[in-house]
Image: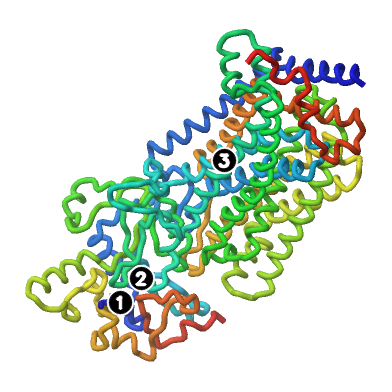
Amino acid sequence: MTRWGMAIDLDRCTGCEACVVACAAENNIQTVGEEQAREGRAMHWLRIERYYEGDFPNVRTRFMPVLCQQCGAAPCEPVCPVYATYHNPEGLNAMVYSRCIGTRFCANNCPYTVRVFNWFDAEFPAPLDSQLNPDVSVRPGGVMEKCTFCVQRIVAGKDEAAQEEREVADGEVKTACQQSCPTKAIAFGDLEDPDSEVSRWAESPRAFSLLGDLDTRPGVVYLSGSEWREPAG
Amino acid sequence: MTTESQRSAAVLDRELLGRLDRRRPGLLVGALASGALALVFFSCWGYQIANGIGVTGLNRPVFWGFYIINFVFWIGISHAGTLISAILRVTNAEWRRPVTRSAEAITLFALAIGGLFPLIHLGRVAIFYYMIPYPNSRMLWPNFRSPLVWDIAAITTYIIGSALYLFLPLIPDAAVMRDRAAAGLKKRFYAVLALGWRGTAQQWHSLEWGIRILAVAIIPVAVSVHTIVSWDFAMTRTPGWKSTIFGPYFVVGAIFSGIAVLMIALALLRRGLGLGRFLTDRVFNNLGLLFVTMSLVWGYFTFAEHLTVWYSGDLSEKLVHHVLLHGDFALPFWTMVVVNLVIPVAVLSFPRGRRPLPTALVGCGVLVGMWLERFLIVVPSLSTPRLAYSIGDYMPSWVELGIMIGAVGVFACLYFTFTRLLPIVSVWEMREGWRHGARGEGEATSGAAPTSATAAAPVPGGGAA
């Protein structure tokens, strides 16, 4: 059985945000505009968190790409009254957009605050409509959404492998953020396969889970040589 | 003694039933004002449905705001009636008689409004029924693990239960109204409500048993409703919400705010409708004592909740605790403590403070305080999430304010209509109480067979059914 997972090497991340742009283009994410973004309604499925350490001039910036952690024990799932978010057999927290009634309970219960909500209907004025990805549905207003691990690419990869009567090879399915990362800081694949790149990264002594003490069993592993888990001081 | 009883019957008829036939200019003004506010409510909601939930001030991370605060607030107010009236009935407190119906009406109307707020809150209200377990060809069920589904079950049960509980003791009075009304639409309306009541001994017996059973059954329902409302918060992992104390804390807060509304409503009814003969100083004194007790219990829970959080040293919990007590939310927090604890205890501890005007004023303060309490539960927790990068802010939009203020108008509309159509003080229960009083207080409080005594009364029912 597959358990899709991701590993992100923070020591390689330069904070360039190419992944954020790639994600928006791949997944038809609504661009809300300046005014709405100022109100805290930007819809990025993936964000680069910036933390500054030290006093000027000895300042150090740390970058941390945060996306849906695809938790094994996801707090968002049990609270949804209509099963619009549920756990699929391959370890993904799947969203059923047509089922979502917009209670926003899931987003409240997400310790990583990675869920985003369509406050209004999406608008893609021409020529933006011609760059929409035909493999991904455009979500209506009043619906929750979040990172899917590019599930459309996973499905396409599995279809292709099935036609050629073989298993999906490691590295065959690439997420948009992984593909666009200039420093190759992201690995994606099957965590159940001990030989996959993502599993090898996850075995690293530098590996840790974000907010690991909550025991949400994330499918995203971070790698860092510095002391991320130490409280600031 | 017979003349005494006849005289009291005449007084009851004149003051409680005759009142319904008179028109007062003040009522018209009140009806127009509340009607206008109700219009604001529905226009704002319509505007939101047409334009999308984005017309609110909600954002990431504050996904819940005024609608959820008002939902908890109104459901809390609904505990005024049914719970208090049921407890007073079960313990056979004689002074309950003039209070119960006005309290039960508050429950039903507050619930109807409180139940609307989760729907107003939805991103896609048109498909709210996905939360209801209805048969469908795709065999899809709601998620019974979600506290929101428990909410629906609890609130639906409570609405049905409190509607029945208001309706049952209303039947004999509706029969009197039917018999008094001239033939026409009005008579038919009361005839439907009276369910063919004739005042036979058998009917009185059934009615009394029905009320007894409902009074006992409704208490656990009321407690469960607000416990489940609290679990909307307490079942999550959000800092400031995950707390075992929330169930009883919410129930106590609900009863507290419920009594506050009851005190205001009774003072208004006493003054506006001239019901001083029924809503006596004793009623206000007793309710005032109950009121100050709830204030102290509420203060105890608040203290216990914040002490444990502060002592635990959990980082994300302490952050929420900090913004509450010393940070951005310190002003509303300490205002809440003053109006919910300091003022009620200072005023209501003394007999002179337990008179209609001071109790109603304290009640207004407590309403503000309990609204602030719900605000302080919802917003600070959400705006201080675990990952500091997402810390946010929330300011309600005019749509949210319009719906919040308009809801008061909808409530007033319903309540005014009710007091115009039916006696707001239960006539037959007052009569029963006075009859017991004439025979001596001891007999009345022992609850000895009021059935036969009331059944013999000539007025309720009559043969005209």
Q: Position of residue B147 (x, y in %)?
A: 50, 57
Q: Nearer the viewer, residue B46 or B187?
A: B187
Residues under numbered marks 2 and 1 in contact, where contact means CB atoms less than 8 Å apart:
yes
Amino acid at the residue labelled 2: Gln
Q: Chain of mark 3?
A: B
Q: Is residue B188 left or right of residue B249?
A: left
Asked which secondary structure carries label 2, the reply is loop
Crowd around label 3: few <14 · some 14–19 · many ≥20 (10 Å): many
Q: Quadrant of the N terminus of chain B?
A: top right
Q: Amino acid at mark 3?
A: Ile
Q: Which residue is mark 3?
A: B159
Tell me how far mark 2 sits from mark 3, CA to CA: 39 Å
Quadrant the C terminus of chain B occupies: top right
Whether residue A58 sits left or right of residue B440 in the image: it is left
User: What residue did someone put label 1 on?
Assistant: A5
Q: Are the residues tagged 2 and 3 within 8 Å (C-beta)? A: no
Picture layout, residue B63 above or below residue A110: above
Same subunit, labels 2 and 1: the answer reads yes
CB contact under 8 Å: marks 3 and 1: no
Seen as rendered, the residue at the extreme left is A164
Disc 2 packing (10 Å; few <14; some 14–19; many ≥20): many
Question: Quarter-wise, where is residue A147 in the image?
Answer: bottom left
Whether labels 2 and 3 share one chain:
no
When the figure is inspected, residue A226 is found, relative to residue B392, above or below; the finding is below
Nearest-to-viewer mark from 3 and 1: 3
Structural distance between the alpha carbons of marks 3 and 1: 47 Å
Going 88% across and 48% down the picture, which residue do you hit? B349
Residue indicated by mark 2: A70
Specify the subunit that label 2 lies on: A
Amino acid under disc 1 = Gly
